[in-house]
Amino acid sequence: MNALKNKVQLIGHVGNDPEVKIIGEGRKVANLTLATNDVYKNDKGEKVEETQWHRIVAWGKVAEIIEKYVNKGKEIAIEGKLTHRRYDDKNGEKRYLTEVVVNELLLLGK
């Protein structure tokens, strides 16, 4: 049950071309956004489509695969863990981010 404590699985479309950087001693990191859609009917019976945007971070081999094969609009499935971090922006204000750190990636579609 330990593996279920912090596990996220998402299928969606990439919202931007991934930003891949090399940091530290040659370690790659990829950052991108992923859109997931939910469709439901409201109490009036009208179809409502809702899009959620997720920040995605991948390291190492997964970042290399993203760099080679993933671009804006590509449908992907990811599995990872939810993380939260805090930083100070250039104006000294505290900012908070919630991200999904990818463990596994599956390329979908064409």
Image (cartoon, grey):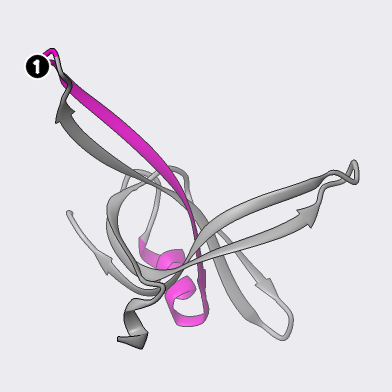
Amino acid marked by disc 1: Gly
* Residue 45 image position (x, y, % from top left): 9, 16
* Residue 11 image position (x, y, % from top left): 26, 55
Please identify the residue farthest to the left as the structure is shown.
Answer: 45
Residue 18 shows up from this direction: no
Which image quadrant: the N terminus?
bottom left
* Residue 55 image position (x, y, % from top left): 50, 52
Confirm whether the magenta stretch covers residue 16: no
**Residue range (magenta):** 44-69
Please identify the residue farthest to the top as the structure is shown.
Answer: 44
Q: Using the image as rendered, state which of residue 17 and residue 4 is in the foreground.
A: 4
Q: Report crowding for label 1: few under 14, some 14 to 19, many 20 or more residues within 10 A (C-alpha).
A: few
Numbered marks: total: 1
| Left or right of residue 13, residue 46 in this image | left
| Left or right of residue 7, residue 40 in this image | left
Residue 29 shows up from this direction: yes
Confirm whether the magenta stretch covers residue 66: yes
The residue pinned by badge 1 equals 45
Q: Residue at x 68, y 51 (%)?
A: 96
| Left or right of residue 108, residue 27 in this image | right
Q: Using the image as rendered, state which of residue 102 and residue 68 is in the foreground.
A: 102
Work out whether 13 lies above or below 77. above
Q: Residue at x 32, y 78 (%)?
A: 4
